Amino acid sequence: MAGPRTILHIPHDSRIIPPDVRVAFVLSESALRAELDAMTDAFTAELFDPPEPVMRCIYPVSRLVVDPERFVDDTVEPMARRGMGVIYTRTSEGAPLRVAPDPATRAALLARFYWPHHAALTAATDGALVAHGRCRILDCHSFAAVALPYELDQAPTRPDICLGTDPFHTPPALYERADALFRAAGFTVARDRPFAGTMVPSSHYRKTRAVESLMIEVNRGLYLDSTTGARGSGFDALRQALTPILSALVRTDT
């Protein structure tokens, strides 16, 4: 039986930092918890969960360990200049986060976390292309209700939904469909703001338009208790609103 055509990529949901990695972090336990609160796309694996058959590619550890959505080469990764390349050495506020890894440690971290995740995403993409001739990646995130210090976009107001696009891999019809669905559900929507772009496996990047991708970011103010970091009063309503939208994006051929 052919596998699903659509992949839900969920890269920043986890708070897990393995103990042998934690030892390199210079933050206290309370400071690390606060940084995880700031940088984790909390509960996105629960929010982005349509009933249709999809492939869910969920990164198993925190982005503070290794960020799977950064370029490995720090010379081409814009956030590396802020100490937040593929392996973060600075916090979201610019403070020291961890001892910078030496080349051998860096290679070991990438081999343990980054490359297996990308191999899984690539394999799922390849499988969809073989089975269906097309693959659609929905890159699922959330963002802070108030801009964090490290963020490039410091606008005082933020939308409910950010739709991130790529000029090669995001078909206009897919973006327009998503934009219309979210607006019809009562959400405010912005394109590539406060975050831009979307995830595509490097082996397919800018090579085939049969790999489609759209990033969907939800404002944490819609669903997260800003004091405790727990599910807020709006969590269930947001999940109920997201489900039919995701279902439509999974089913649609646009």
Image (tube, grey):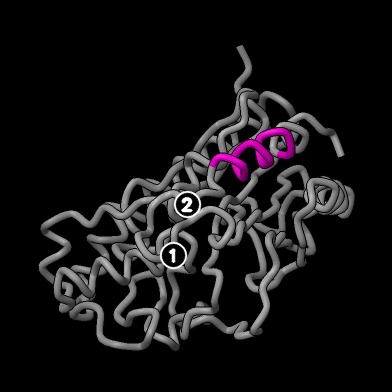
From the viewer's perspective, tell me whether residue 11 is left or right of residue 97: right
Label drawn at residue 226: 1
Q: Residue at x 76, y 43 (%)?
A: 210
Residue 217, given in percent of the width and then of the height, sits at 62, 58
Residue 26, by quadrant, is bottom left
Whether pointer 1 and pointer 2 mark residues with C-beta atoms closer than 8 Å, the reply is yes
Of helix, strand and loop, which one carries label 1?
loop
**Residue neighbourhood size for the residue with mark 2, other residues' Cα within 10 Å, grouped as few (<14), some (14–19), many (≥20):** some
Q: Amino acid at mark 2?
A: Gly
**Residue neighbourhood size for the residue with mark 1, other residues' Cα within 10 Å, grouped as few (<14), some (14–19), many (≥20):** some
Q: Is residue 195 above or below residue 245?
A: below
Between 145 and 121, the one lying in front of the other is 145
Q: Residue at x 60, y 85 (%)?
A: 154
| 58 inside magenta stretch | no
Which stretch did the figure color magenta? 236-245
Between 187 and 39, the one lying in front of the other is 187
- On the image, numbered disc 2 is attached to which residue? 232
Residue 250, by quadrant, is top right
Of helix, strand and loop, which one carries label 2?
loop
| 242 inside magenta stretch | yes
**Which quadrant of the rendered structure holds the C terminus?**
top right
Q: Is residue 164 above or below residue 123?
A: below
Q: Residue at x 83, y 53 (%)?
A: 183
Residue 17, by quadrant, is bottom left
| Magenta stretch: dominant secondary structure | helix
Q: CA distance from mark 1 to mark 2?
A: 8 Å
